[in-house]
Amino acid sequence: YRIVRPDGEERWIHDKAYPILGASGEVARVAGVSEDITERKLAEAEIIRRVEAERILRSELDHRVRNNLASLITLIEMSERSAEDIASFASAVKGRVNAMATIHSFLSRTKWRDVGLAEMIDALTPPDARATVKCTGEPVLIPAYRCNSLAIVLQELMHNSMKHGAMGGGAKKAAPEGVVNGGNMGAVVGLFGLCWGDVGLFLGMPGSGLGNAAINAVG
């Protein structure tokens, strides 16, 4: 049982009592020992807390692995349908898997906390292309469970920019212009706007290729 000391501190006590018999066998008195077991109770509570935390972690890990594998299967199927040959298929799959792996490593370092959108973009941008990327707008935090989907979208935008636009050296001015965010958009809380532009270039209207299909699939 617990007691509260005069200074307000709670302590756990364990009592043991036993009778002391008289000459004729009757109970003459009762003796006992009280033991302070607070440290033991605290240690037991910590063990229970750690076991529960490990259970939650295993459950979350299982959930994330299943979601990532499902996303990977979807991307492979989409890449397979649109690829013209084995080389282009391998390149498409590699880029998308690398984006997922990069964000997974990034989230591991941040202990799976919500991350800034600008930090995500920086993590996904190839080192030799970072000078061409400029992010503007208010800070936006992305929930950890949405980061993989957004990473695929960003990877598609970067892939197109490196192939046709500013990240590939085709523009005179640093681009993409980056993030335009109004915090909340309209009456829906939690939404933000992402505007990607290659400054100084006009690539025509977007087509209906794999990039758009991948964005629509995870959007």
Image (spheres, rainbow, N blue to C red):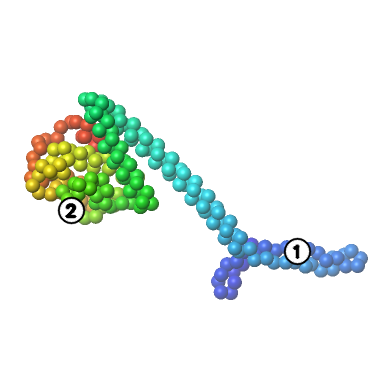
Quadrant assignment for the C terminus: top left
- Cα separation, mark 2 vs mark 1, equals 73 Å
In percent of width and height, residue 105 lies at 34, 46
Residue 74 visible (yes or no):
yes
The front one of 95 and 144 is 95
Q: Amino acid at mark 1?
A: Ala
Q: Residue at x 28, y 33 (%)?
A: 93
Q: What is the crowding at mark 1: few (fewer than 14 residues within 10 Å), some, or many (at least 20)?
A: few
Nearer to us: label 2 or label 1: 2
Residue 178 shows in this picture: no
* Vertical comparison of 141 with 158: above or below: below
Q: Nearer the viewer, residue 43 or 6?
A: 43
Q: Position of residue 81 (x, y in %)?
A: 25, 25
Q: What residue did someone put label 2 on?
A: 136
* Res 80 quadrant in image: top left
Query: Which quadrant of the view contains residue 212?
Result: top left
Please give the residue where the numbered disc 1 appears in the rendered image.
17
In percent of width and height, residue 78 lies at: 27, 29
Under tag 1, what secondary structure?
Answer: strand
Mark 2, secondary structure of its residue: loop
